[in-house]
Every structure is written in C-alpha cells, then in structure tokens.
Image (spheres, helix red, strand yellow):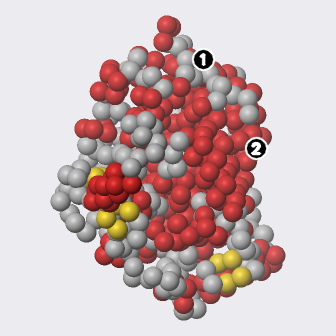
Amino acid sequence: HAMRHAVAPAENVENNYFAVTDQLKICTHCERLSKKDLGVRIPRPLGNGPSRFIPEKEILQISKVDARTQSIFEDAFAALGRLDNISLVMGFHPQYLGSFLRTQHYLLQMDGPLSLHYRHYIGIMAAARHQCSYLVNLHVNDFLQVGGDPKWLNGLDEAPQKLQQLGELNKILAHRPWLLTKEHIECLLKAEEHSWSLAELIHAVVLLTHYHSLASFTFGCGITPEIHCDGGHTFRPPSLSQYCVCDIANGNGHANHHDDPLGNQVSGQGWRLFSELECVLMERMKQLQECRDDEEASQEEMATRFEREKTESMLVATAEDEECVPSRDISRHFEDPSYGYKDFSRRGEHVPTFRVQDYSWEDHGFSLVNRLYPDVGQMLDEKFQMAYNLTYNTMATHKDVDTSMLRRAIWNYIHCMFGIRYDDYDYGEINQLLDRSFKIYIKTMVCSPEKTTKRMYESFWRQFQHSEKVHVNLLLMEARMQAELLYALRAITRYMT
C-alpha cells in the first residue's frame, strides 16, 4: 500500500504519523520507544542477569572493557545463534572461554562417531544426574532442533536400547568413578545389535564427563536459566503502565534503572579493606616454599599424608546435607535417583587409591582419546592446561603473586577426593592452604553440585573478586572432568589389553 502511494498527500502523512505515535510512547526510564499497552503478555526475566551470585553489572562490564571477550561472544553467537549465560560468566577469562567453546562446538557439531541427536541426548542424561534443569532444558531444545524424536524425552525407557545401556556408565562416572571396571566397558561393546563401537564410546564418555562437570560449574556459579527456558521468565501482566522494553533486555525492573545515571557508583568491593585472609594465605605459601627447600619427606610419609587427606575429604560434609529429591521432569532422564555421592560416603565404603604414575592423562589418556576421536585429545589437553595454568599473578588486592602452589593444592585436593594420588606431591600442603569453608564448597560443587548455595559461594575467600571465584570454579570443573576421564579411559585401556 505504501509503495503504491509513494507520494502521499500531506494530510495523509500527518494522520499516519499521529496514528503511529498514538501506539508508541516515550519510555521515561530509558528514553527509548516502547509499545503502548496492547494487551500483550511479555515474558519478563525472573533473575537479575546470568548469575544469582555475581552482580549483573560486573558481568556486563567484562565485554565492554575486553575486546577479546567481545569478539569471542560475537563468534559464539554467530555459530550457535545464542549466547548462553554460562559463556557470559566464563567471559571473565576470555582465553579459557575460547578453548571451552571450541571444544564444546567440536563435541556437539563437528564430524564425530555419534549422530547429532545422540550427542544432545547424552548431554541431557549427564546433566540430569545432577538435576541440572538449566543444561537439560538447553539440550532438550537442541535435541529437537536437530531432529531428535520427542518420544525419547518422555524418559530414558523410551529411548533406544543402546542409549539405555549407557545409564549405568553415566551413574557410576557421575558419582563413584572408582567403581568403573573393564566389565562395564565390555557390556557396552559386546551388546550384540545394540553394541557401541570403541570410537562411539569414547565420544560418549567425553560428553558425559563434560556435562557432569559443566553441571558443577552451573551450580557453582549460580547460573540462571535463559529467558526462553523454563524457570527463566514469568509473565508481566499486560496492563502495567510503568513497563519498558529494556526490562526484557537486561533483567532489571525499572526501580533500579537509574540508581546510578552516570555509571560512576563504586561497588563496595572496589574499596575493600586489606584482607587478613590474603595475608595468611600468602604467608603460608612462603613458609611452605621454604620447608620444601629444607626437607624432603620420605615416600612412606608422603603416602600416609595422602591417605589421611583422602579419609578426611570423605568426612567433609557437603552443603547443608539436606535431601534433594529430583523432580519427575528431570529424573525421567536417568535411572536410580537415590544413587549419589552422599549415599556412598554414608555407607563409609573405601575409595581405592589410583596412582597417577600407573595411568596418567599426559602419558596414557591423552593418546587414547586422540587415537579414537581425532583432535579431541588435543582440545581437552589445551583446556585442562588453560584452567590449571591460568593466572594474572594477582590475589585479591595483591599484585605479582605466584599462585601456582594454591592452584596445585586445589587441583590435587579434588583428585584426592576421587582417590587419585600424585606421588611427588606433599598432601600436607592442602590443609595449610585450603580452609574448611573452602573445602565444603569444593566438595559440594564437585560431588553434589545441586546443593551449592549462595551462602557457600560467599563464605569462601570472602575478600576475593568474583573473577577469581569464577577462575576457581573453572579449576574445579576441569579437575573433576579429568578425574572422571582417567577412570573411564583406564577401564577402556584395561578392556583393550
């Protein structure tokens, strides 16, 4: 119609103009145009930003100040058509985020032994073990998008027999990987018409461990659901006059839009007092370094210290230790909901020791993955290294700090909880560097992530910045993934030999 009347009479133009502006009003809060109330129910974010634990302002600030983060975000959006909240929070560490997204993209999208809908379904199975509805919902959408059969989503018992057989591996890897044997592997590889090939199994194992540990990160950083997913939004009543479209964009109600019109309000964190904890930690690292130079403990003493730490780690309570009963919505994606880490520690079963000199990622696991699923070993290795070696040589308010001793203590403590021992490491250092509230956070986040609370996140390392706490979460996630992988790959190697 507009094209036919390219040259419209002046009064028509004027009438049209008023008809349009009558449907629009200037938003008093952000001075953008927003639709006048047309009775439309607009979804409104429930949370404030991507994380319940980290102020939204800080997360949004990252990509403004770091060009590399901005470009990684753009690439991720171009590849996936979305930028999920996990990526936004990982954006504090762009170098790591790049490696993480490359690996995940390869596992889900690129050539590999498993079909695309199998990959997403395995992601759902793995995330469901920890009741991680955030990841389950994300992959339910992806599963349907790549042509997955909606019937499978009614429950694991509606999926093909081949996927159902993965249930046992999923369960053991998520909660008690040390119980995995070559017999479990044999059952999967020799199941007649439902058999897995070795290459398919490696792909499945990497996906399971990736999503178990990503569930840990999701809960550990308080990631909130995307607005288009269940739990990510509510509907605002259509007749609310004080509503503007910018509410959808950033998840803030108008009440706090303009607390800080010039953006120069300084958060309390900026003026933090010189912290006692930092000083204690730095002092301890210095003392430990000096002791290392002075005395070398015997092999027997080192082994005893490991066993002591392993036993103690079993006694660390996870979270408030309340029962978490998974909703039917999530539990249908896996079997045996009562099977978990807590149930294991209650019964006081013994965790056997896994000696890294007998089977390590560097010497054994890496080459097995690379041989059966080319390039993935390389990508995982880079991601492990990135999380382990990542440092800005700062600690809270201090600059030029060597944090390698602290990073190693965190990594080795997690492996110790899984029974994995490095014979050249003095486990006595762990108690010197990791305090009780931090150990509780680590154990909960790694073993029962669904119980992680905001209070626990806030209570460890109070004076540290959110970016440093996210870094810790990356370390925990990668150490957990590597521990699970070591047990799975060792079982596969034993089956092959």
Q: Which of marks 1 and 2 is in front?
A: 1
Residue 18 coordinates in the image, percent (x, y): 31, 59
Residue 36 coordinates in the image, percent (x, y): 27, 59
Identify the residue at image location x=71%, y=67%. Answer: 391
Residue receiving disc 2 = 362
Residue 84 versus residue 337: which sits nearer the camera? 84
Badge 1 element: loop
Question: Does any portion of residue 195 appear in the rendered image?
Answer: yes
Identify the residue at image location x=66%, y=25%. Answer: 111
Q: In which quarter of the image is the N terminus?
A: top left
**Is 274 located above or below residue 464 in the figure?**
below
Q: How far apart are marks 1 and 2 (CA)?
A: 24 Å
Q: Which of the 4 image quarters holds residue 287?
A: bottom right
- List the single residue furthest toward the right: 293
Label 2: few (<14), some or many (≥20) within 10 Å? few
Residue 110 coordinates in the image, percent (x, y): 64, 30
Q: Answer yes or no: do the residues labelled 1 and 2 have beta carbons within 8 Å? A: no
Question: Does any portion of residue 444 appear in the rendered image?
Answer: no
Identify the residue at image location x=39%, y=50%. Answer: 9
**Is 392 located above or below residue 185 in the figure?**
below
Which amino acid lies under the numbered mark 1 shown in the image of this protein?
Ser
Residue 255 coordinates in the image, percent (x, y): 31, 75
Identify the residue at image location x=45%, y=29%. Answer: 145
Badge 2 element: helix
Residue receiving disc 1 = 197
Which amino acid lies under the numbered mark 2 shown in the image of this protein?
Glu
- List the single residue furthest toward the bottom: 273
Residue 32 versus residue 391: which sits nearer the camera? 32
Label 1: few (<14), some or many (≥20) within 10 Å? few
Q: Which of the 4 image quarters holds residue 314?
A: bottom left
**Is 192 located above or below residue 200 in the figure?**
above
